[in-house]
Image (cartoon, rainbow, N blue to C red):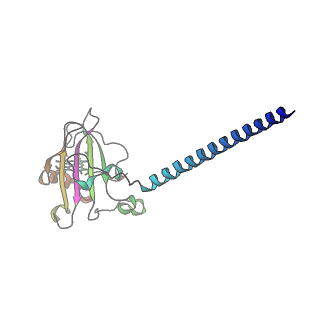
Amino acid sequence: MKTQTQHQLLLNLAVIATLCLCFSACTSEQASEELVQTLQEETTVVEPEEPAVPLPGLPEDVAGYTQWLKLNAEPIPPVPGGDPHNGDKNVYVNKTRETIAPNGEQQFPYPNGSIVVKEAYRPGKDYVGLIAIMRKKAGVNPDHNDWEFIEYTRNASDADFAIIAKDGVCWGCHAQVEDIDYVFTELE
Ligand code: HEC
C-alpha cells in the first residue's frame, strides 16, 4: 500500500515536471518569436530607401529615370531607312502627368528644370546602348527654347557611357518640332 502511494507521488511529480518544462519551452518560444518580429519591424523602419544609381558614365541627375513619367505608351521602333537614335526607344520626363498635361492635354513649353531622357535598345541587343538627354535651363540657349542637348552611347552592357554628340548636331532635326518645344514624342 505504502509503495503504491509513493509510486503514485513520483508519477505525479513526473507529470508536473513535464508540464513545467513544456510550459517554459512554449513561452520562451513565443518570446523569441515576438523578439524576431520586433527586430523585423525595426529593421523595416530603419532600412533606408535604395538610392537610385545612374547607369555607369551618366550624370547623377538622370539616376532612376525609368521611374519617371514615360511619354510613349509602347516602345518607339527604329525609323526605317536610318534612325538618328537607332533602336527601340522609350522617352521619360522628370515631371508628373498633372504638371505637363493639366486637364489631360499636354501643354508647351516644358517648364524650366525639365529633363527629357531617351533610352534606346540597339537592334538585337538587350541592354540600353544609347541615352539622349534634353535639359531645359533658363537662359542657357534662348534660340532653342533653352534646351541643352547631349547624347551618350556604349557598346556593352557593362561598359561606361561616353558622350558622342551634343547641341549643334541636334538642333536641325529637333527644330522641325519647334512648335511643340523641340520634343518629338508627345505624351500618350
Ligand atoms: C536626324 C534627326 C535627328 C537628330 C540629328 C537628332 N535627333 Fe533626337 N530625335 C529625332 C527624332 C525623329 C526623335 C523622335 C523619337 C524617335 O523616333 O527616335 C528624337 C527624339 C529625341 C529625344 C526624345 C525626345 C523627343 O524629342 O522625342 C531626345 C532626348 C533626343 N532626340 C535628343 C537628341 C540629341 C541630344 C541629339 C544630338 C546629339 C539629337 N537628338 C539629334 C531626330 C533627331
Q: Is residue 179 above or below residue 36?
A: below
Which one is in front, 20 or 6?
A: 6
- What percent of the width, then of the height, locates residue 10? 76, 36
Depth check: 24 or 36 in front? 24
Task: Please tell me in which quadrant of the rendered image residue 97 appears.
Answer: bottom left
Residue visible at 36% across and 43% down?
74
Q: Which residues are magenta?
A: 126-135
x 14%, y 54%: residue: 167
Instruction: Please name the residue shown 35% across and 61% down the image.
Output: 100
Q: Is residue 67 visible?
A: yes
Q: Position of residue 42 (x, y in %)?
A: 47, 54
Q: Quadrant of the N terminus?
A: top right
Q: Main secondary structure of the magenta part?
A: strand
Residue at 67 percent of width and 44 percent of height: 23
Q: Is residue 183 visible?
A: no
Q: Residue furthest front?
A: 2
Q: Where is residue 75, by image quadrant?
A: top left
| 143 relative position to 123: left or right | left
Q: Does residue 139 lie above or below 38 as drawn?
A: below
Q: Is residue 168 left or right of residue 90?
A: left
Image coordinates for residue 53, horizontal then vertical, percent: 29, 50
Outermost residue, bottom side: 139
Is residue 94 highlighted in magenta? no
